[in-house]
């Protein structure tokens, strides 16, 4: 019924004291250590002074290696992880590179992970996408990355392959001495 | 921009802004560069399935997690989780966390000198049923002071976390209690500038939810925004 358009429940901050309510699921990885294709995604959350944010909650959500989501994937595939940043503002999660999934236009997108960050001082969350810096070919054809004209904003969306084989993706809530603010997104309804 | 993935659309005026000076912590944490409004892709239009196996039967009774009964006013909080068209969001995770009946959190960094209750941790979770309904049994949390400004007090509230059928519907918010005089002076509540929208966070007292001789009842329904889910996800 088009007449039924209900008022959306608004957002409020997660506050500082959420650990005892949210940590029950905050230690699971997406894949086990030693799994084929396992990668480590890690990074830090920084505020506008360039200080680490030790009380953020990060969630990631992604397709499996074939670009599928539950329930259309193997049962063990959760596709989701939650992390509470530690006292140094760091998060670490073991996952795999997701397969490619289409944009709303039907065009294939480069592999990416969806990320949401909550924190005290954020009255609503920030949403971003984690792309992989070593996927230059698919990144060069990604409908979103190619639509962002600002090169420095685009580069905030790329996880950097480190010497130890892990991918580093920092979240900068504002411009700071640690770099330009991460590009965040809202979604058309 | 041939694909039209980025849209020139203003943000919703209903949600709080990232910057709200009366809530001091927004100054260094709220983004200054505007988010891009984009059309969601397949990832954003799907959402995790948490499943029965992760939730224990008493995880939605915060008064039954310890050997003894917690101190305070026992309450039932129940309601329905829906999308913007009023369709129920079924079998989805709902989590809560809250202060105890003295206004103290079971968190190492809460330095409010109100007593901890050894029989109350204050975290709970459940899955919505086939009609989108959730239900918690808990203790009514108390107001607590905080350092935002002189004599600042948070109104009594329960923190709630929701998922929809699309990850773009993800919501964390706070439920308030009807008639609380502290709501009017609370910067976090009033970051929602339209009183009619703020009122959506205030539960209503509901005789039908009371348990005679045991618990009072509060009803609170939730409407998740965000894009309509894909037919596949329904
Ligand atoms: Fe709180």
Image (cartoon, coloured by chain):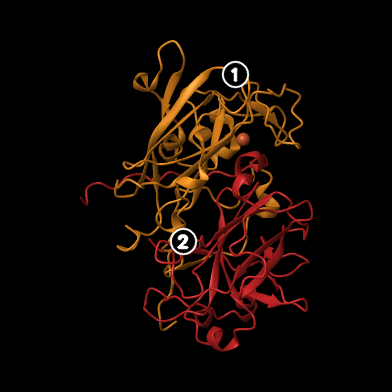
Chain colours: A red, B orange
Mark 2, Cα crowd under 10 Å, few <14 / some 14-19 / many 20+, is few
**Residue occupied by mark 2:** A75
Residue at position x 65%, y 72% in the image: A39
Kindly state the secondary structure of the residue where label 1 is placed. Answer: loop
**Residue nearer the viewer, A20 or A13:** A20
Counting from the top left corner in percent of width and height, residue A20 is at: 65, 39
Label 1 Cα crowd, 10 Å radius (few <14 / some 14-19 / many 20+) = some
Q: Is residue A18 visible?
A: yes
B52 or B16: which is nearer to us? B52
Q: Judge whether A68 appears above or below B70 on screen.
A: below
Q: Is residue A169 visible?
A: no
* Corner quadrant of residue A15: top right
Seen from the viewer's position, the closer of residues A141 and A132 is: A132
Q: Chain of mark 2?
A: A
Residue at 68% in and 46% down: B25
Question: In terms of secondary structure, where does tag 2 sit?
Answer: loop
**Mark linked to residue B69:** 1
Point out residue A162 in the picture as x, y percentages from the top left corner.
Answer: 75, 77
Give the position of the N terminus of chain B as an image quadrant: bottom left
Q: Is residue B102 above or below residue B18?
A: above
Q: Position of residue B15 (x, y in %)?
A: 48, 48
């Amino acid at each position: 019924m088009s007449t039924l358009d209900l008022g959306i429940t608004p957002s409020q901050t997660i506050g500082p004291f959420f650990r005892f309510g949210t940590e029950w699921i905050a230690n699971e990885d997406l894949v086990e250590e030693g799994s084929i294709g396992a990668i480590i995604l890690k990074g830090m959350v920084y505020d506008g002074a360039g200080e680490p944010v030790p009380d953020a909650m990060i969630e990631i959500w992604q397709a499996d290696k074939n670009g599928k989501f539950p329930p259309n994937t193997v049962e063990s595939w959760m596709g989701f992880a939650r992390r509470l940043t530690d006292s140094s503002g760091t998060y670490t999660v073991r996952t795999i590179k997701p397969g490619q999934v289409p944009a709303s236009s039907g065009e294939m997108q480069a592999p990416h992970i969806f990320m949401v960050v909550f924190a005290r001082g954020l009255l609503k969350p920030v949403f971003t996408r984690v792309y992989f810096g070593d996927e230059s070919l698919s990144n060069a054809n990604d409908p979103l990355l190619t639509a962002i004209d600002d090169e420095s904003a685009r580069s905030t969306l790329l996880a950097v392959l480190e010497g130890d084989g892990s991918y580093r993706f920092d979240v900068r809530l504002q411009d700071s001495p640690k770099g330009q603010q991460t590009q965040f997104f809202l979604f058309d309804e | 921009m041939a694909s039209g993935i980025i849209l020139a659309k203003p943000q919703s005026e209903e949600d709080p802004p990232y910057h709200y000076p009366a809530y001091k912590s927004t100054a260094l944490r709220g983004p200054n560069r505007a988010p891009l409004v984009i059309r969601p892709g397949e990832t954003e239009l799907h959402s995790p399935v948490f499943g029965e196996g992760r939730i224990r039967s008493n995880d939605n009774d915060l008064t039954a997690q310890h050997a003894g009964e917690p101190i305070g006013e026992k309450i039932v909080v129940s309601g329905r989780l829906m999308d913007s068209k009023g369709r129920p969001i079924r079998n989805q995770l709902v989590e809560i966390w809250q202060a105890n009946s003295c206004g103290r959190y079971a968190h190492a960094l809460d330095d409010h000198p109100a007593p901890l209750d050894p029989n109350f941790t204050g975290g709970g979770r459940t899955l919505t049923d086939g009609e989108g309904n959730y239900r918690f049994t808990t203790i009514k949390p108390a107001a607590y002071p905080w350092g935002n400004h002189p004599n600042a007090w948070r109104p009594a509230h329960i923190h709630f976390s929701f998922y929809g059928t699309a990850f773009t519907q993800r919501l964390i918010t706070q439920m308030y209690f009807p008639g609380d005089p502290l709501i009017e002076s609370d910067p976090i509540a009033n970051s929602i500038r339209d009183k009619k929208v703020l009122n959506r966070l205030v539960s209503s007292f509901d005789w039908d939810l009371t348990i005679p001789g045991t618990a009072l009842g509060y009803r609170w329904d939730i409407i998740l925004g965000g894009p309509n889910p894909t037919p596949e996800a329904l």
